[in-house]
Structure formats: structure tokens, C-alpha cells
Image (spheres, rainbow, N blue to C red):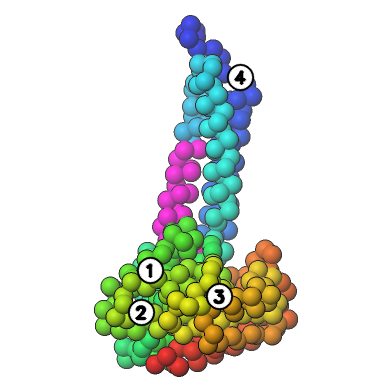
Amino acid sequence: MTSPESTPTPAWLLWTDRVLAAAALGVVAWACVTAWGAIVHGHPAYAILLALTAIGSVLVLVLSVTRRTGRPGWRRALRVGGAVLGLVWIVTVAWLRPFPAIEPALMALESDDAVAVTETATRIVFEPADGGDEPALLFQPGARVDPRAYAAHLRPLAEAGHLVVITKQPLGIGFLNMGALDAAREDFPRVTSWAVGGHSLGGVVASMEADASDDAAAPAAGLLLFASYPAGDISSTLTAAVESISGTEDGLSTPEAIDESRANLPADAHFTIIEGASHAQFGDYGPQPGDGVATISDDDARAQITAAALAFLDSLS
């Protein structure tokens, strides 16, 4: 029996709820199957998002079976609006799936006599056995890229004596991790000189951190850009030395965009252009949609990127 104030819920609305809930569970399963390592080793925010999505989907499925009546009018309109928001949520969760790290990055995460590798929920640290020379490097990953993907590129910097901290960003978005440099300073008080760097969107955030460092006594010593450029003009405000490393086959941070960024950086910024390198070769995470086609091997690109980055850090010592 239905109450006078309730009517049977239209079949199309019930099935909309069920289809969206099933789709959400499918997205959660797909993300876990295809990017489990990146989810487990990334910032916990995305894992929490997946868990909430799964729980909410199960609740919607149960309610669509046990409650087949509802009140018409604005309440039903609100339910339709909720379905639209649910679709947006599902698309967002799918889009936020990280690009998982692949070899040789994973092998570079092993500690040995030269470098101690430690990992927490918010960062990966490569610490030289002898304590390290300055400056240390705080590195921001590219959008939705597994932080571990940069291990093979950055571990050689630690082997050469520089402390390296790869930050883990909430949901893989650098703008949600703007305080990473100040947090690293607090957690490694023995380090008095820091360079900040990043790949792609991570480089944009690194540029903002380097330009807005709130430690007047020890501003960022260097800004290291991997296939990236600042979001605005910092040519007259940035005091840090700048090294921009880019590839000629980058389909995302294109050579044209890198060239245009020269006007937004200090006049003494140094640009290293790697012939044949693509955007995704600045990490080890496989192909990336929208990228160009590399004409050099991953090993060759990695070696040149690492050499340029190390030369830059050494120049700041």
C-alpha cells in the first residue's frame, strides 16, 4: 500500500538509479584493477574517494530495490538532480584514476648502501647515506601521475648527494598540495637550502611555491621545470635560479608553449631542450593521451633529463 502522499516511483527513475550505481561500481573496480599500485602508494585521498563511491553505490542499489515509492513534485525533481550529480561524480572519479608507475621506476625505490628510500602517505624520500649536500629537491608530480613514476629520474640526484622529496598530491592534483615546500622545510630542519621542481602541472605549482616562498631568510634556491612553465609572469619577482627541461616531441607542454614561457621567467633562466623527447618520458608511467610521439628511447630521454637536473642542482651548491 502507498500512503496518500506517495506514489510509485517511475520505472525509468528506478532504473536510472540502478544503472548509475552499477556504473559507479564498475568505475571503482576498473580503477582498482588497472591502477591498484598507484592507488595504494598514492595519497590516500583517492582511495577514500573510491571507498565512498562504492559505499554510496551499494546504498543506492539497495534503496532502489526496497523503496519503490516516493513523493512527487520538488522531491522527485531533487532526485533527478541527484542523478545528474551522480553522473558527474562518476566521470570525475574515472578521470582522477592515476597513471601507474612502471619499470624502471619501481626498481629505483629499493634502498641500498648509497640511498635510503622511505615512503609515507604524503611523500617519497631519497636520502643519501652521508646525509646529503645542499640544496635538497622538493618535487611535484604531474597531474594524476603516480609519484613513484619519477623514482628512476630523481634517484641519481640522491646518489650524487642531494636529498630528494617527491610529494604525494591529494587526488593527484598539485593545486591541492600548495604547502608541500614549507612542510618539507619543517620536517627536514637540517636542510637550509631547497630547490623546488615539478613535471607538467606539478611544475606550475612548483613555480608558484618558489615565487611565493614565505621563508624570507631562505627563499627557494632553484626552480626545476620538467616539461612545464609558470602560469603567469614571475620574471621580476622570482629570485630562484631556473632550469627548464623540455622535449621537442611534447604534445602537451609543446615547444611553442615552452618558448613563450621565456618571457615569464627571469632573463637568466636556462633552457635545456631534449631532441626527440615526449611529455610522458619525464616520468615512467607509459603513454599519455594528447602527447606526441617520442623519437628517442625512454632510457636515452631519462639519462638526458637526469643529467640536466643534476647539473642544475650541483650549480646551486
Residues under numbered marks 1 and 4 in contact, where contact means CB atoms less than 8 Å apart: no
* Quadrant in which the C terminus appears: bottom left
Alpha carbon separation for disc pair 4 and 2: 62 Å
Judge depth for marks 4 and 2 and give the one in front. Answer: 2
Judge depth for marks 4 and 3 and give the one in front. Answer: 3
Alpha carbon separation for disc pair 1 and 4: 50 Å
Judge depth for marks 2 and 3 and give the one in front. Answer: 3
The residue at the point 50 percent across, 92 percent down is: 311
The image's mark for residue 78 is: none
Q: Residue furthest front?
A: 236
Viewer can see residue 299: no
Circle 2 packing at 10 Å, graded few (<14), some (14-19), many (20+), is many
Q: Which residues are magenta?
A: 37-57
SS at mark 3 in the image = helix
- Where is mark 1, residue-wise? 180
Judge depth for marks 3 and 1 and give the one in front. Answer: 3
- Where is mark 2, residue-wise? 219
User: Which amino acid lies under the numbered mark 2 shown in the image of this protein?
Assistant: Pro
Looking at the image, is 284 positioned above or below residue 306? above
- Where is mark 4, residue-wise? 10
Residue 237 in magenta stretch: no
